[in-house]
Amino acid sequence: MTKKIAILGSGQGKVFESIVNYLKNRDIEITCLSNNLKSELFKTAQDLNIKHKYLPKEENTQYFASENFDLVVLTDYDEKFDNDTLEVGKFINIHPSLLPSFKGEDAIQRAYLAGVKVTGVTVHWLKENVEEETIIAQYPVLIGITTHLDEVEKDIYDVEKKLYPPVIDAILNDRVFDFQDLFKSSCHANSSCGGGCSKCHN
């Protein structure tokens, strides 16, 4: 039976192409949605021949209630959902920190400036009250004493591309995400890899 997912974003949607490529040989119908007509998501969707639609925030509840998606995947989405919308579907989000630390905007920069030695990426179920959000998966990124902010940003992005697609696939197949899916590369045996090194996680 064909699964239906929506990928919803406002800006670049950096991991969109990785998700599409990961799921392309599965029986899954993908719809790209954005509240921004100038979103890079639409250009990428056109290039990949993926159905896409402009969706302003005020239409969210009615649209998701009518479409009955198996899963709605957020990436770079800049609006908050109210509870009415969240009750008509299953929504997940990806955040560039190890929640519950560094919630909200500019998480990578705030973690870096705070001097933390380990940050990372979190995939979680979306709730109106952030305190009720359930973590699905996390993956760490180490910050060395000579690491620059732009290196951390790249490593976070690399981990997002690796982590989000298999988590989505696991949810669609009603199974618990297995980290073994990420450990098929040589980095599993590389003690210098903190989870987001650019050499291992391209």
Image (cartoon, helix red, strand yellow):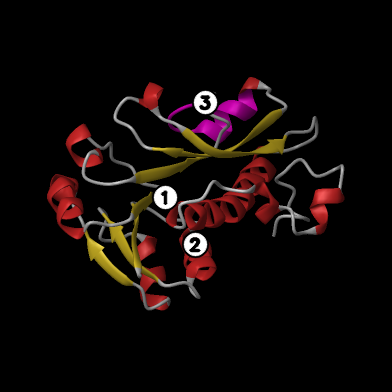
Which residue is tagged 2? 19
Q: Is residue 181 above or below residue 131?
A: below
Q: Residue 75: which disc?
A: 1
Inspect the image, locate mark 2, and give the three-letter code of the amino acid beneath it: Ile
Q: Residue 48: which disc?
A: none
| Left or right of 191 in this view: 154 | left
Q: Nearer the viewer, residue 20 or 48?
A: 20
Tell me whether the residue at label 3 lies in contact with that at label 1, contact meaning CB atoms closer than 8 angstroms: no
Tell me whether the residue at label 2 lies in contact with that at label 3, contact meaning CB atoms closer than 8 angstroms: no
- Say which element carries label 2: helix
Which of the two labelled residues, at mark 2 and mark 3, occupies the earlier sequence position? 2
How many residues crowd mark 1 within 10 Å: few (<14), some (14–19), many (20+)? Answer: many
* Residue occupying image coordinates x 72% and y 43%: 195
Residue 122, image x, y percentages: 54, 38
- Say which element carries label 3: loop
Q: Is residue 101 above or below residue 9?
A: above
Inspect the image, locate mark 1, and give the three-letter code of the amino acid beneath it: Thr
How many residues crowd mark 2 within 10 Å: few (<14), some (14–19), many (20+)? Answer: many
Quadrant location, the N terminus? bottom left
Disc 2 to disc 3, C-alpha distance: 25 Å
Quadrant location, the C terminus? bottom right
Q: Residue 102: which disc?
A: 3
Tell me whether the residue at label 1 lies in contact with that at label 2, contact meaning CB atoms closer than 8 angstroms: yes
* Residue occupying image coordinates x 77% and y 59%: 185
Q: Nearer the viewer, residue 171 or 140?
A: 171
- Say which element carries label 1: loop
Inspect the image, locate mark 3, and give the three-letter code of the amino acid beneath it: Phe
| Left or right of 109 in this view: 49 | left
Residue 105 colored magenta?
yes
Q: Which residues are magenta?
A: 103-113
Residue 25, image x, y percentages: 50, 75
Q: Nearer the viewer, residue 162 or 44?
A: 162
